[in-house]
């Protein structure tokens, strides 16, 4: 039985993870950590409750988890990872906004044999969207990304958009000139979006959205749009469960669900 600690357990993603792990075969929730919701009882979806704890170090010492799943906030996730990894707890991380340098620094200080698994997107359809975008980029190098998320998302652009830009840029044969900030009218700065990996990324934030992305390729007389929609947070759960099962047999830093799917 894999013993799972959920960090960010009262959040939109964490509460879904708590219910999913409770229902999944071969794993159990041993602790729920969320400082802003200390002592609150979280519904485990199976008729039971799990009390939220405030202090991650204490929770780890008292419950001895095998895996920590972190869906918290870009400002706290690195500290959580340092605490969990130094206690020998493997980590499955969905929190976005972590810099590559931070990830490398965290894993460099982690004990031998521990694993830090990070996925910018746990939805299998999103992994396929990135995979297909890489294929298209080889033949249609002119590309822009539109990502659309709910209005309480803490970071922009999304981790998925940043990862897509890196993968697509590495896959394309040439980097075509893209009209950029120099075409923006005074008073409308930002109209052309952010430029990451020589690709324009446009971030939409609206109530009613969950997590969506379009990768739009342009060619002579044609466009190709590859779109993925997470219409419900349950879309991320099969990927999270897979990562919890796999992380114990891996070590070091592993980035992307595609590493576990063999895409
Ligand atoms: P949320 O704001 O609903 O939940 C975050 C929770 O973390 C809150 O309850 C907050 O109190 C708690 N928290 C804050 N500091 C903490 C700490 N030090 N320890 C433990 N808990 C702490 O946010 P959300 O919508 O659930 O998203 C969480 C993160 O997951 C964001 O970074 C988001 O972008 C990311 N996300 C990733 C994926 C993916 O597939 N990788 C999917 C959806 C969301």
Image (cartoon, rainbow, N blue to C red):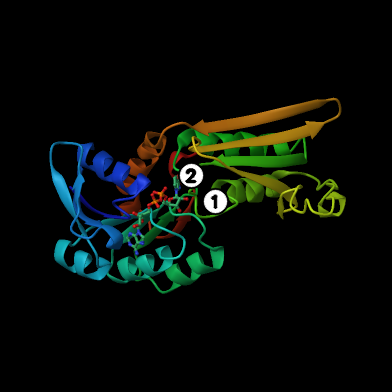
Q: Could you tell me which residue is drawn at 48 percent across and 44 percent down? A: 121
105 vs 146, left or right, is left
Dividing the picture into quarters, in which one does residue 218 lie?
Answer: top right
Q: Which residue is mark 1?
A: 159
Q: Could you tell me which residue is drawn at 60 percent across and 31 percent down? A: 227
Q: Could you tell me which residue is drawn at 20 percent across and 64 percent down? A: 59
- Number of marks in the rendered image: 2
Label placed on residue 4: none
In percent of width and height, residue 10 lies at: 29, 51
Q: Is mark 2 within 8 Å of ligand 1?
A: yes
In percent of width and height, residue 91 lies at: 35, 58
Residue in front for this viewpoint, 111 or 31:
31
In percent of width and height, residue 159 lies at: 54, 51
Label placed on residue 121: 2
**Crowdedness near tag 1: few (<14), some (14–19) or many (≥20) residues, C-alpha within 10 Å:** many
Q: Is mark 1 within 8 Å of ligand 1?
A: yes
Q: Could you tell me which residue is drawn at 16 percent across and 61 percent down? A: 63
210 vs 6, left or right, is right
Helix, strand or loop for disc 1: helix
């Amino acid at each position: 039985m894999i013993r799972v600690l959920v960090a960010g357990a009262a959040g939109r993603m964490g509460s879904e993870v708590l219910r999913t792990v409770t229902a999944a075969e071969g794993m159990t929730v041993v602790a729920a950590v969320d400082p802003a919701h200390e002592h609150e009882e979280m519904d485990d979806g199976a008729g039971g409750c799990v009390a939220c704890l405030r202090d991650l170090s204490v929770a780890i010492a008292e419950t001895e988890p095998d895996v920590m799943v972190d869906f918290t906030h870009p400002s706290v996730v690195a500290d959580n990872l340092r605490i969990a990894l130094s206690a020998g707890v493997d980590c499955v991380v969905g929190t976005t906004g972590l810099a590559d340098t931070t990830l490398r620094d965290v894993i460099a200080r982690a004990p031998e044999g521990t694993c830090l698994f990070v996925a910018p997107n746990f939805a299998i359809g999103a992994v396929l969207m990135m995979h297909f975008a890489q294929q298209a980029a080889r033949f249609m190098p002119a590309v822009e990304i539109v990502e659309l998320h709910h209005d309480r998302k803490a970071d922009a652009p999304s981790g998925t958009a940043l990862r897509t830009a890196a993968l697509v840029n590495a896959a394309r044969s040439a980097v075509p000139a893209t009209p950029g900030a120099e075409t923006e009218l005074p008073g409308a700065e930002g109209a052309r979006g952010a430029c990451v990996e020589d690709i324009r990324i446009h971030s939409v934030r609206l109530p009613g959205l969950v997590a969506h992305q379009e990768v739009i390729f342009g060619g002579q007389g044609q466009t190709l749009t590859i779109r993925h929609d997470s219409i419900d947070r349950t879309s991320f759960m099969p990927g999270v469960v897979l990562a919890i099962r796999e992380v114990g047999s891996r070590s070091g830093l592993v980035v992307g669900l595609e590493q576990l799917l063999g895409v």
